[in-house]
Amino acid sequence: MAGIDNIIGQILQEAQEEAKGVIAAAEKEAASIREEAQRSAADLKKAADERSSEAVKTYAARSQSSADITKKKAILTAKQEMIEGIMSEALERLENQDDAAYFAMLKKILAKNVQKGDGTIAFSAKDTARLPKGFIEEAQAIAKKAGGSLKLAEPVKGITSGFVLAYGGIEENCSLEAIFEAGREKIQDKVYRFLFS
């Protein structure tokens, strides 16, 4: 029996050694899988961190861009308001200058706009009330020099300063408001260059 016991012992020993080998190989495989899982988890975390960092950078850039646009709009609005204020003040000063200077300016405007032929000149109600003595005769002389004639018409509604010329049903608005509006872009450009250059 000792021979059988030896054979059984040897078989058991070989089985235990083989089991130890299988267990060692399984532990080695498990460690390798664990290491690979840890590397994958680290790679996933790094990728998530990079995406998160990139999203934060993109959001920050968009926020900065939006803030810059808002700032530029606010500056532009402020500049436009300043220009409008200056233009309104300039128009008001022209309208409210003393009568001698005001009507001298209107004569220059008339000389630039008078036409040949028979026409009428109609002032604003405010200007009609303060027409200097002899102004109509001076306006007629300016018209005559240009080959035409002018008659005084009833005050024109809808303008606060200046006059309207009419020739054969065609009117030319020579109010200060209309002159400012016609030259608005040029005036705005000059004011802008003066203020912000």
Image (cartoon, grey):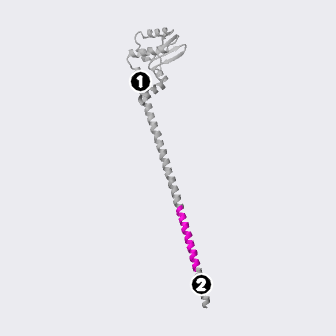
Inspect the image, locate mark 2, and give the three-letter code of the amino acid beneath it: Gln
Mark 2 secondary-structure assignment: helix
Decide: is 98 above or below 53. above
Q: What segment is highlighted magenta in the picture?
A: 16-39
As for residue 189 lying within the magenta part, the answer is no
Question: Residue 10 at x, y = what percent?
Answer: 59, 84
Q: What amino acid is labelled 1 in the image?
A: Ala
Q: Residue at x 48, y 15 (%)?
A: 112
Q: Residue 154, can we see it?
A: no
Question: Would you name the residue on which mark 1 appears?
Answer: 90
Q: Looking at the magenta stretch, what is its main secondary structure?
A: helix
Q: Secondary structure under badge 1?
A: helix
Q: Mark 1 or mark 2, which is nearer the start of the sequence?
A: 2
Can residue 56 be spotted in the picture?
yes
Q: Could you say which is closer to the camera, residue 161 or residue 77?
A: 77
Image location of residue 193, percent across then percent down: 44, 28
**In this view, the mark in front (2 or 1):** 2
Task: Report the front residue among 79 and 19.
Answer: 19
CA distance separating discs 2 and 1 = 118 Å
Which one is nearer the viewer's eye here, 67 or 28?
Answer: 28
Crowd rating for badge 2 (residues with CA inside 10 Å; few <14, some 14–19, many 20+): few
Write the residue at 49% across / 18% down.
Answer: 173
Outermost left residue: 98
Give the residue at x 41% y 29%.
195
In which quadrant is the C terminus drawn?
top left
Residue 33 lies in the magenta-colored region: yes
Disc 2 marks which residue?
10
Does the residue at mark 2 contact the one at mark 1 (Cβ under 8 Å)? no
x then y, percent, for residue 159 = 46, 20
Residue 56: horizontal and vertical position, in percent? Answer: 48, 50
Q: At x 54% / y 64%, what residue is drawn? A: 37
Compared across the picture, whether 2 is left or right of 131 comes to right
